[in-house]
Image (tube, helix red, strand yellow):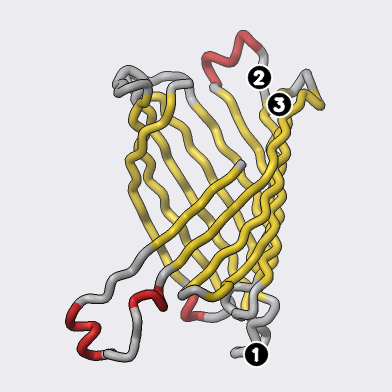
Amino acid sequence: LADVFYRKVWLSSGARDKAPDVSSNEFDYGAVVVGLRQSRLIFPETGVTTITGLIGQSWYGGEELARWADVAARQVVRLAEDRSLTFGSYGLGVTLRNVWSDSATVDEFATALRADRRFTRIGPIVPSVRIRLEDRDFRKFTATAGGRDDQLMTLEATAILPDVTFYGFVPQGSVRLRRTWSTVDIYDRNASSFSLTAISRC
């Protein structure tokens, strides 16, 4: 597995006038992630077990920001053949992530539990839902007494339109809602997003 991400920032003329000594390069962000994924029938009567290991490095403003290691395990729970059309399929996942950084708001150890369910086709769409519960311990955060610990809950609903194809790709729409509870009040937040992507039919 490999992933490369880069975000380039350009300052507006108004921003340059207010901060003439600041370069837009100071806000650029990049990250590189590499890893391995192995899928096996460890429990044939249950379904496929998938283990993924990732390492990554990020940069901000041309300086190293953080590096991390991420290990995830996912177990598919397969139902009996005569019930699969009614109940769809389920997935369970556990993730451990350790991030090393000089920044107290980036350095963290996180654990997460994920459960998802993919339904059989309903009309023109194939829907799925996912819930993710995560705990993030910011070990270097000493700005407040007791440090900082965040709990996050993410709900996501996705719909695929398998009959709408374009060069071998089909559209997928997702709605995501996230709630963060933090021991530091300024990090309490609600977030929502909508995305539309194209995925391969393979």
* Residue at the disc numbered 3: 48
**Dot 2: what SS?**
loop
Which residue does the image show at 33% across and 69% down from the upper left?
9
Residue in the image at 36% along x and 64% along y: 8
Q: Is residue 5 left or right of residue 15?
A: right
The three-letter amino acid code for the residue at tag 3 is Val
Q: Earlier in the sequence, mark 2 or mark 1?
A: 2
In the picture, residue 135 is in which quadrant? bottom right
Report the quarter where the N terminus lies.
top right
Residue 13 coordinates in the image, percent (x, y): 18, 80
Which kind of residue does numbered mark 2 sit on? Leu
Identity of the residue drawn at 47% across and 80% down:
186
Dot 2 or dot 3: first in sequence order is: 3
- Residue labelled with disc 1: 145
| Discs 2, 1 touching: Cβ within 8 Å | no
Q: Quadrant of residue 97?
A: bottom right
- Which is more toward the observer, 62 or 133? 62
Indicate left or right for 14 with 65 as reference: left
